[in-house]
Image: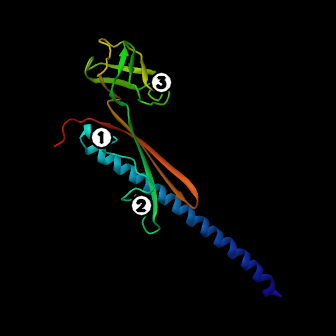
Amino acid sequence: MEIVIVMPMLAIISLALISVVTFASRLSRIVSNQIVAKNIAQSYFERMAIDNFADVTPANYPSATLVSSPPLYLDSVRRSRCSVDIRITGYGTATGGSANTLVHAGADWAPNEWAGDTLLVIGGTGRGQRAQIVSNTADTVALAATLSPTPTSGTCYAINGGKTVQIQTHWRYLNKSYDAKIESLVIDWGPRR
């Protein structure tokens, strides 16, 4: 009689333990993949930080897809891969402007993504000027201060003194999608030795 009572209890306890171990294993794999994905993104930033500032461009740091060659493995044993989307923004050559705006046609900024940041004119007309950004549209920043001379086509600028790099990694595990995104500023430290 005792065996008849104990066996179902042991079966229930065993199933519960198996479920807990399976859940813990899956969670561990997700966390491990997330750490590796962030390390991949961090390695891009570290390469950009020591590269010549002019070479930090989308052409030199292209995004990678899940089928890129060579692949970016999160786990080479399980052959799980990740994709990497790289966006370099906040730096470039103006296409026009006024005393209180700078226009960069085709910049594709998110509305007000630069609000509160600082615009520095680093080349061309108005070089050396700086102003706080009040707001922005997809291609125009509105400034709190008046620029004189005003930016013209060919004026080079840097928001916050560098290039803002956003790196987003994406991967799948057990038919679910996961993302990790990090952002950093790459500064022009002058000529590298």
Q: Position of residue 181 (x, y in %)?
A: 46, 45
Q: Earlier in the sequence, mark 2 or mark 1?
A: 1
Disc 3: which residue: 137
Q: Nearer the viewer, residue 157 or 8?
A: 157
Position above or below: 152 against 46: above
Image quadrant containing the C terminus: top left
Q: In the image, residue 16 lies at what x, y percent?
A: 68, 71
Please provide percent x and percent y for residue 104: 38, 25
Q: Earlier in the sequence, mark 1 or mark 3?
A: 1
Residue occupied by mark 2: 73
Proximity of marks 2 and 1: CB atoms separated by less than 8 Å: no
Q: Which mark is residue 131?
A: none
Residue under circle 1? Answer: 56
Residue 156 location in percent, x, y? 29, 25
In depth, the one of 95 and 133 nearer the eye is 95
Number of disc labels = 3
Drawn side of residue 71 relative to residue 122, left or right: right
Neighbour class for label 1 at 10 Å: few (<14), some, many (≥20)? some
For this rendering, which residue is in front, 101 or 65?
Answer: 65
Label 3 secondary element? loop
Relative to 53, does residue 37 appear above or below in the rendering?
below
